[in-house]
Amino acid sequence: MALYIYNDLTRQKEKFVPLHEGWVGMYVCGPTVYDHAHLGHAKSYVSFDVVLRYLRYLGYRVRYVQNITDVGHLLDTGEDRILKGARRDRIEPMEVVEIYTRSYFEDMDALRVTRPDISPRASGHIPEQIELARVLLEKGHAYEAGGSVYFSVETFPEYGKLSGRRVEELLEAVRIEQNPDKRHPADFALWRRAEPEHIMRWPSPWGWGFPGWHLECSAMSMKYLGETLDIHGGGLDNIFPHHESEIAQSEAATGKPFVRYWMHNNMVTVDGARMGKSMGNYVTIKEALRGAHPRLSRAYSPLAIRLFVLSSHYRSPLDFSDAGLQAAERGLGRLHEAVRRVRSRLPTAPEGPASPEVEEQLAAHKARFLAAMDDDFNTPVAISVLFDVVRESNARVEAGGASRGTLLAYDAFYRELGDTVLGLIPDDVGKEELAGLTEDLLRLLIELRAEFRAQKDWARADAIRARLASIGIVLEDGPEETRWRLER
């Protein structure tokens, strides 16, 4: 079965066919790094992490680009978010950027979100942004006024094709800044003039200034992925004006389609309202990991948060609740316990191939799992398949007598689909118990050897010492006890 993706540009599911066979260029709008990431960010980046993982699982070579916005993303008040963070924390703007960029990646690493291949910063690509603005001026799609450069939406008749609204409707849907320099109220800034006291500014052909938020993503995505991207992702709230403006300026500059498949994740909600910093109702990822928020009854593990996110389809809203996170933690516990049972039985399982019945069942489960993922990355259904396997593997293990081949078949399913695709089962699941079990077994052998020595059964006592030495464990007999150490 082929992979189908819901394309927000055409408003329908479409068979995924990349521009270049076997290679996918994927860009996802990254964070504006002026504060810690919250659970709304987790929804976005965990969702697109699974998109990335599944594309790679299917054999595509994917170049994944996710930007870091460190200048140009303005609040409704016109204030740059980074400057707001700098005033709040009483530090330099680039200190804000460094602190919260590190914080963001710490959170994403904890959630097992794959690092992007390239994480370009807006402030590191000023020449590319100036050049894109210059091209748009040259082609008559932009104009300079008062040291700023604006895109003229009237020169791009398709403006609004992503959001599905006419320019007049868009003006009513959002706040449009009143600016006498603009020829049309919907025109947006490609480059903004900066006053001398403005901390973040760069020289340009139009004077000192800084780039517009929309221009940044177009310049950076096309630099690393070419003039036409296979996939562009972001939050649903990015459709207008951000992605709409990206389309206009990019296609006006190149004359080519900017993106083949537009994907947008839905929001995390709190009591029906979108979670966000501007709403004041957010829970940071760090707060969730520590349980340090009034809405939380306890701390939650990173993978419980990941499972909580993936339990909803990426295009569906996810309502935040402490009860929902508790359910995810319990579900993760059941999943990991099933994997531990399989892996702990492997060393002592009787040799033999996998049961034909088990192989048939797992093949059917895999087909259902892949069908769900091929249907626009339907992770809730894929997770339900995973838990069907949990029930079956638990029953096999509890019944006893499962062959090594059967247990390996279950373990392979968990590794291939539960981890490679969904990222929910790290390799160390089960090893934490085995580490303690190993030490307990070692202590048991030492005690058994002591009994042989007390019985003057030197042959058996020496045999235990020799066997342990052969695997690098050296015993040292003392006046009161026998100690052991590893020698490699």
Image (cartoon, rainbow, N blue to C red):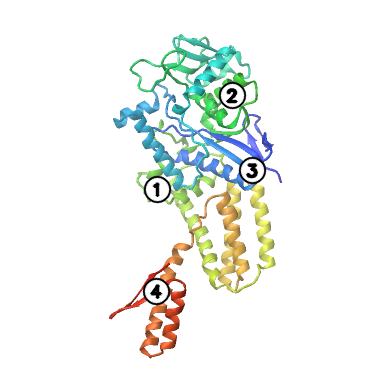
Instruction: Return the residue at label 1.
Output: 289
User: Residue 42: x, y in percent?
Assistant: 47, 41
What kind of element bears circle 2?
A: helix
The residue located at (60%, 58%) in the rendering is: 413
Q: CA distance from mark 1 to mark 4?
A: 41 Å
Tell me if 374 is positioned left or right of 29 in this view: right
Instruction: Return the residue at label 3.
Output: 60
Instruction: Return the residue at label 2.
Output: 247
Q: Residue furthest right?
A: 1
Tell me if 471 is positioned left or right of 263 in this view: left
Q: Earlier in the sequence, mark 3 or mark 1?
A: 3
Q: Earlier in the sequence, mark 2 or mark 4?
A: 2
Q: Which label is found at residue 474?
A: 4
Q: For residue 63, which quarter of the picture?
A: top right
The residue located at (65%, 23%) in the rendering is: 256
Q: Which label is found at residue 396?
A: none
Mark 3 against mark 4, which lies toward the viewer?
Answer: 4
Q: Callout 3, which amino acid?
A: Tyr
Q: Residues within 10 Å of mark 2 (few under 14, many from 20)?
A: many
Q: Callout 1, which amino acid?
A: Leu
Mark 3 against mark 1, which lies toward the viewer?
Answer: 3
Q: For residue 411, which quarter of the picture?
A: bottom right
Q: CA distance from mark 3 to mark 1?
A: 33 Å
